[in-house]
Amino acid sequence: MSAEPNPVLNLPAIEVLTSKLRRRQVVGSRPAALETLILLRQVVAKARFSNIEQLVEIIRTVGRRLVQAQPKEHSVGNTVRKVLHHIREEYNTATKGTSAAPSTTSFSISKFISQGQPKRQNTGSGPNHHPQAMMKATSTWVNHVPAPPQDGRRASVQINRKEDVQQEEEDDDDSTDGEGSSAGPSTTTGQDPDAFAKGLKPVLMEAIQDVLDELETVYDTVSKNAKDHVHSDEIILTLGMSRTVEAFLKAAAHHRNFTVIVAETGPSYSGHAMAASLSASSISTILVPDSSIYALMSRVNKVFLGAHAILANGGAFATTGTLLAATAARTHSTPVVICAGQFKLTPKWNLYHEYGGLDFGDPGDVLGFEEGLLTDGVDVVNPHYDYLAPELIDAFITNDGDHPPSSIYRLIKETYDDEDNDL
Amino acid sequence: MPVATNPTPDVADNEGHDPAGGQRDQPPLKSQKQMTKAERRELQEKQRAAKAQGKAHNAGGGGQAASSSRAAASSSSGTGPSSGAGRPRPAGPAAGPSYSAASRPSAAAASAAEDADNKHRGPRIFSHFGLTRQVAVNPKQGIMIHPAIQRLALQFSEFKITGANARCIATLTALKSVIEDYATPPHSTLSRHLMAHLSPQITHLVAARPMSVTMGNAIRQLKLEISNSDIDLPEQDAKDALCQTIDNYLRDRIFVADEVICALAGKKISDGDVILTYARSSIVEKVLLHAHSEGKNFSVIIVDSRPMLEGKSLLRTLTSLTSKTPNPIQCTYLLLPALPSVITEVTTAFLGAHSLHSNGAVYSRAGTALVAMLAKGHNVPVVVCCETYKFAEGVQLDGFTRNELAPQPLPSSSQFPLSKPRSSLVLQSTPKLALLNPLYDLTPPRNITAVVTEVGLVPPSSISSIPLAMGRQTV
């Protein structure tokens, strides 16, 4: 590994979260994202670095370890990417006043289109960077090999700073504990190697806090326009337990009277919890088995679903059963809406695999051990996720507004930096 | 509290079955033991008022006394002269069989009644689904129900016998014993009176669980035979002829038909195939076992879902019957939501049917439509195995208009795996929460590749021509 002897990387909290993820003790997009974020905050607080590249590399190393621990929990990687994006952004704004050459992040079509962020109009980033980033953006998620670099500079070269910074980085690569005081970062004070970190840390912590705040309020922000999506006396189908959909429907219930049909979706039967929760907020709820989705679909006005991850092509991973419901909705021309927080945006694709995410659960949930005689010689399949093609989805309702599947790529481009697609 | 549910007339009408007039105005009673004494009395007052002619044996003591008196009076069943020749209510203490089972499901019935209450508060578009009915084993007072029918009604209502074929076979067998025990009362002819004698028996069955299309078809055929039977025939000969007719019907329309379907559908299975099937259909099970006995090597994916989880039973049959053979069927078992993960591996989907409509739509166990939809979407041929006696008249457009609800809680096998605490899964209905378990859904013809019947493989568009081509007169 490219693990420099950085004391931060030996932080016990990293190992704790890694094993938690691996053991599926942290399950679900949002808990995983929250845990990751809290860990990253800790890492940044403890990290010692003398320039931004070192910090980025530290975070990437941590992120890589987390992602490898549980590659199917996409929100972990997404959170790391988002933090990296914010750190660069904060760094850029912080150094803009002082630095002669304001650095830029990478080239992005969406920035040309939107032209919304004048501070990043300088697109003269390293020319060697473009093809690589574009290639990575389009590679399938299956190719998600652990990030290549022994040479940490290839990834961090986009911070297009002066030569002396890169020189200095080489010097400091192996020793960040403060003795390499040959040449301070030119942009900041210059003498004390920790001064750079000291100066930047408050800003970075603020940036991470922003991400955390966004994550903590994500349900509220997703559901703030709920009443615009639901009309009175509507019959809504949802499936399993999705916290986002739950919050969304409850928010809509403040303004509208409607009925929710909850499909229980085996083998987790999480729809039971959903139905109990919705009916407790006095929403008229009907709990049905998965088998009756088709029969009832002809009376359903809208299908609201949760997602596990939103992919770059506008598709989504979601709990099993979602594909059946969405396909049935499509045959009945019923709109399918996915409610999800932005932290589920994942810059990866799934083009080839029917086994959504290739992740399997305990077969005992399907055929319990009380059927011991049956289980002998029988294959029992219990996948966790379905892959929902973008054609089956009509809209995504996120905390960043409502989007059709076709513009998800743009959101992803705006949310993350291209060079982080492969951590 | 809602006095007894009343689904009987609707269903009976739909099936074209015509119970004797006057008997439908009174729904079958709920188990009387669950009522309070006051309620029982009130109910009886109402009945008496309705009947205008009071029944002496009912006057005192409420329902319990009545039922016990009936139990005591149980004797040679079905032969009394008082068996109500066309009269809605026979007078006098009827010679009914023992009612010891009548009050068994009282607790369950009470919860069903609560369900019924709550259902009304749900959205109104679901109200036509009717109420989940628990056992309605208590027949109208005074009408004798043959013990075979009594037993069958209990088995139906507790879902001990399920499946269109099994229910039809059981019904015809029970009706056969009713006919064998039947004696024409004086001054009446068999062809006229037997019909009236059978009607309450059938009504009792329907009260336990709505009649299946197969039962309706078979009973209609039986009634046709009864009315056609020769008036001059000695009674025993006429009864023998009717029993023979029933046996022939079972043989021709079900058993032989199944063999032909097995042979025809078996040709669509070849070595190395991956067969997909949903839940458990008796005919699909036969097809798979038949193909296996021919030495074909294929694997089976069994898809299953609540509320019935019948696939486990198919899995049990397939694994236990073939595990000792040199080429055991490799079975894969999964729940319906996981189906998209395996659908690409499937060669052919074999599905069973509850009934078949003339537009080619297949009315079958809930979930079948989802399987057919997904299979069709992945260009997997969807083959429905179905005997011609399952053909229902008329067109059905969706699985919503007509359906049947599974009772809550379902009195059948384990519904959930034990790896989870069941209490966390079994919800109770509350004013805001309704539990809806439709038993059937409708697969539109566009999702069906072919229907295998005993007259050959037909595309769903040609279904409507089959009954006429077979010379069926009752269309």
Image (spheres, coloured by chain):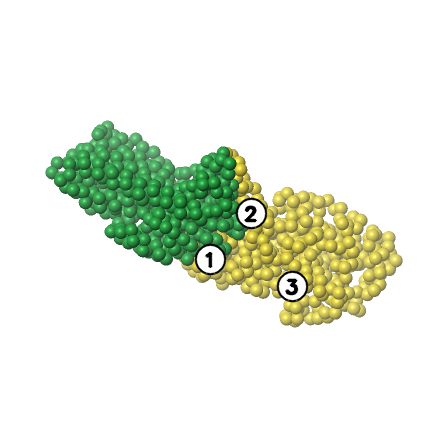
The location of residue A286, given as percent across then percent down, is 43, 50
Query: Quadrant location of the C terminus of chain A?
Result: bottom right
Which amino acid type is marked by label 3?
Answer: Lys
Within 10 angstroms of label 2, few (less than 14), some, or many (20 or more) residues? Answer: many
Which amino acid type is marked by label 1?
Answer: Ala
Q: Which residue appears at 33% of the width and 48% of the height?
A: B388
Which amino acid type is marked by label 2?
Answer: Pro
Residue topped by disc 3: A413
Which numbered marker is on residue B95?
none
Residue topped by disc 2: A383
User: Disc 3 and disc 1: Cα gap in Å?
Assistant: 30 Å
Residue B127 visible? The answer is no
Camera-nearest label, 2 or 3: 2
Q: Which residue appears at 82% of the width and 61% of the height?
A: A166
Q: Earlier in the sequence, mark 3 or mark 1?
A: 1
Most extreme residue toward the right, as rendered?
A182
Asked whether disc 3 touches disc 1, contact meaning CB atoms under 8 Å apart, the reply is: no
Q: Chain ID for label 3? A: A
Q: Chain ID for label 2? A: A
Front residue (pair B198, A339): B198
Q: Earlier in the sequence, mark 2 or mark 3?
A: 2
Q: In the figure, the yellow chain has which letter?
A: A
